[in-house]
Amino acid sequence: MLPDVGILIRQLRANGYDGWVAGCDAFDDKSLEGTVGDPASLEKVMFATHGATGVDSPIDQFLAQCKADGYKINGIFDALGADMVQISYEAAKKSGTIEPAALREAIRAPGGYPGTTAPIISFAEKKGYPVKAVPVMGFSGGKRVLITDAQPTFVPALN
């Protein structure tokens, strides 16, 4: 979506639109602020994402450490990858094997596992996708702010 969403927001504001712009995880790219231009253009922008970034969160700290260790960082996707490594590792320890069926059952076990993008990530409830806290981000004075970071009360089934 970026830089297009930043350009879209800039165009909306230039044409007099002063309403809310709501988005999703692509808005979490750190280039949004620069692409929009005028920080005031972000005052009515909010988005839900995989994890809070740009607010000195555990994700920001993880990505900074990866960069300091010499890794090329591609954004929040590196933290999502870390989640899967952490969950797979903990599930292998719990099951005592890396046999696929046993590993899958351990991943789906109640209680979930700690992650980088959320304190607990659980596959027990939906079996095929995670249930975890979903941050909603906004802007104040051109800076990212965390509006809420809670697990949704309703997560629909995909089947």
Image: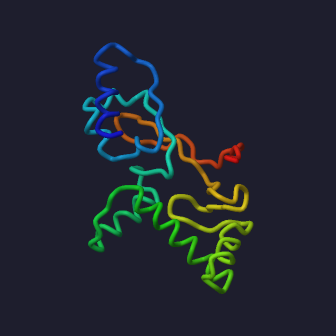
Depth order, front residue of 92/73: 92
Q: Residue at x 34, y 13 (%)?
A: 16
Q: Which scheme is used to colour this image of the protein?
A: rainbow
Quarter of the image for residue 74 reads bottom left
Q: Residue furthest bottom?
A: 96
Q: Position of residue 156 (x, y in %)?
A: 70, 43
Q: Whole-percent x and y of residue 33?
A: 31, 39
Relative to 8, residue 101 above or below:
below
In the rendered image, the residue lying farthest to the top is 16
Compared with 27, 74 (above or below) is below
Query: Is 117 left, or right, of 13 in this rendering?
Result: right
- Which of 53/121 is in front? 121
In percent of width and height, residue 36 lies at: 29, 32
Q: Is residue 145 above or below residue 104?
A: above
Q: Is residue 138 left or right of residue 130?
A: left
Number of marks: 0
**For this rendering, which residue is in front, 46 or 85?**
85
Residue at 46% x, 65% y: name it: 81
The answer to which image quadrant residue 13 occupies is top left
Residue at 59% x, 67% y is 114
Question: What residue do we see at 41% from left, 56% from top?
Answer: 76
Name the quarter where the N terminus is drawn.
top left
The image position of residue 42, as x and y in percent, is 37, 31
